[in-house]
Image: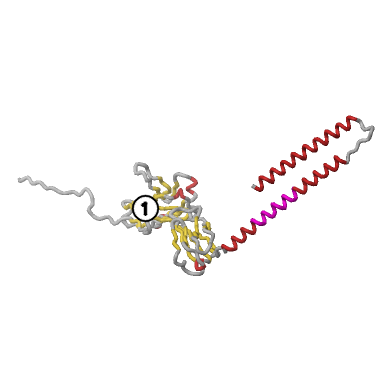
């Protein structure tokens, strides 16, 4: 008998290509939404007859740090939904479809806030099939109603600047000026979309009118209006005449004040002099009373001289 050896190759794995479960959602990789709105993150999937395992759906937030674990948000297994992490966050999350096992595992988020900005991953497993889909959500604040104002006096022939600014809103904010009714802005004006300034180098009547400024970003737009006037510059001759008339009026008022002050002081001095001259003494007038009256006259005379000196000094200072 001859000894014969037979060898057989037993494959350790199948070489057949597996046509298994696939996530079919298509859409933008980055979704931008305004604060306070809601969003649905799409995750539609399609399974094959070869996928016989238990259906498992997971939504998680991808950690920007690759050394850290991702944060699980919600899952669906054996017909049951599970929520993880922050319970306040749970109120804002829900599967878009009532039954995620029917091919739609999309996630809805209500009342968006900046805290929802993240990269989300939808993972669908049904052995042997498994697939996933990632997308980024950016929650932004809409621009607030901007404030419009003008600098430069609105005088014809002078430079004028129109300004527009929103106090709130996620960057980048873009500002755009346009005329509300008269069409395009006349030549000679330049606007800066970043600062919101519309600069007119040489103002004229052709620039007068109502202007509209729009502040916008990726999630919203707000506007304000401004009525730009074209004022004629004042007449130089009229300004000079007005200055002269005003100066003469001030001088006249000053002279009237001086005359009234002089009249008041003169009347007081005359009264005191007449009062002192009217005093008469009888033969039996007490000596101490006469001395008291003489002292009173002396004080009146000194006070009158002091006030006269003060008056003359003040007149001299005003004249200089």
> Horizontal placement of 270 versus 40: left or right?
right
User: Vertically, is 245 above or below 181?
Assistant: above
- Mark 1: few, some, or many residues within 10 Å (few <14, many ≥20)? some
Residues rendered magenta in the picture: 247-261
Left or right: residue 131 compared with residue 147: left
Rendered residue at 21%/48% (across/down)? 12
The image position of residue 213, as x and y in percent, is 49, 61
- The residue under the point 45% across, 55% down is 195
The count of marks equals: 1
Q: Is residue 313 left or right of residue 234?
A: right
Question: In the rendering, at what x and y percent does residue 53 appear?
Answer: 34, 51
Q: Say if residue 145 shows up in the picture.
A: no
In which quadrant of the rendered view does residue 300 lie? top right
> Which residue: 48% across, 47% down?
89
Quarter containing the N terminus: top left
Q: Nearer the viewer, residue 22 or 218?
A: 218
Q: Is residue 172 above or below residue 268?
A: below
Please say whether residue 155 is visible from this viewpoint. yes
The foreground one among 194 and 102 is 194
Spot the residue most to the top: 288
Indicate the secondary structure of the residue bearing disc 1. Answer: strand
Q: Position of residue 37 (x, y in %)?
A: 49, 55
Nearer to us in this view, 48 or 210: 210
Residue furthest bottom as drawn: 182
Q: Taken as a whole, is the magenta stretch helix, strand or loop?
A: helix
Q: Is residue 196 part of the magenta span, yes or no?
A: no
Q: Nearer the viewer, residue 283 or 144?
A: 283
Quickly name the residue at label 1: 134
């Amino acid at each position: 008998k001859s000894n014969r050896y037979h060898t057989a190759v037993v494959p350790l794995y199948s070489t057949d290509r597996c046509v298994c479960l696939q996530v079919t959602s298509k859409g933008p990789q980055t979704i931008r939404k305004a604060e306070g709105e809601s969003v649905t993150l799409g995750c539609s999937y399609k399974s094959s007859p070869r996928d016989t395992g238990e259906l498992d759906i997971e939504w998680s937030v991808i950690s920007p740090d690759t050394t850290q674990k991702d944060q699980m948000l919600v899952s669906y297994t054996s017909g049951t939904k599970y929520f993880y992490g922050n319970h306040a966050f749970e109120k804002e999350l829900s599967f878009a479809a009532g039954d995620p096992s029917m091919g739609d595992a999309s996630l809805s988020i209500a009342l968006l806030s900046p805290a929802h900005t993240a990269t989300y991953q939808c993972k669908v497993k049904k052995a042997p099939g498994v697939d996933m889909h990632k997308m980024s959500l950016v929650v932004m604040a809409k621009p607030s109603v901007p404030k419009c104002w003008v600098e430069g006096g609105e005088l014809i022939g002078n430079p004028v600047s129109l300004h527009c600014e929103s106090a709130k809103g996620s960057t980048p904010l873009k500002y755009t000026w346009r005329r509300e009714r008269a069409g395009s802005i006349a030549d000679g004006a330049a606007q800066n979309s970043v600062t919101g300034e519309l600069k007119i180098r040489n103002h004229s009547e052709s620039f007068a009118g109502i202007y509209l400024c729009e502040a916008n970003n990726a999630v919203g737009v707000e506007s304000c209006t401004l009525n730009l006037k074209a004022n004629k510059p004042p007449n130089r001759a009229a300004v000079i005449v007005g200055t002269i008339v005003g100066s003469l009026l001030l001088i006249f008022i000053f002279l009237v004040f001086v005359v009234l002050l002089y009249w008041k002081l003169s009347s007081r001095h005359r009264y005191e002099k007449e009062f002192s001259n009217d005093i008469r003494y009888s033969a039996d007038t007490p000596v101490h009373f006469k001395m008291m009256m003489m002292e009173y006259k002396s004080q009146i005379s000194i006070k009158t001289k002091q006030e006269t000196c003060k008056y003359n000094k003040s007149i001299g200072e005003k004249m200089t």
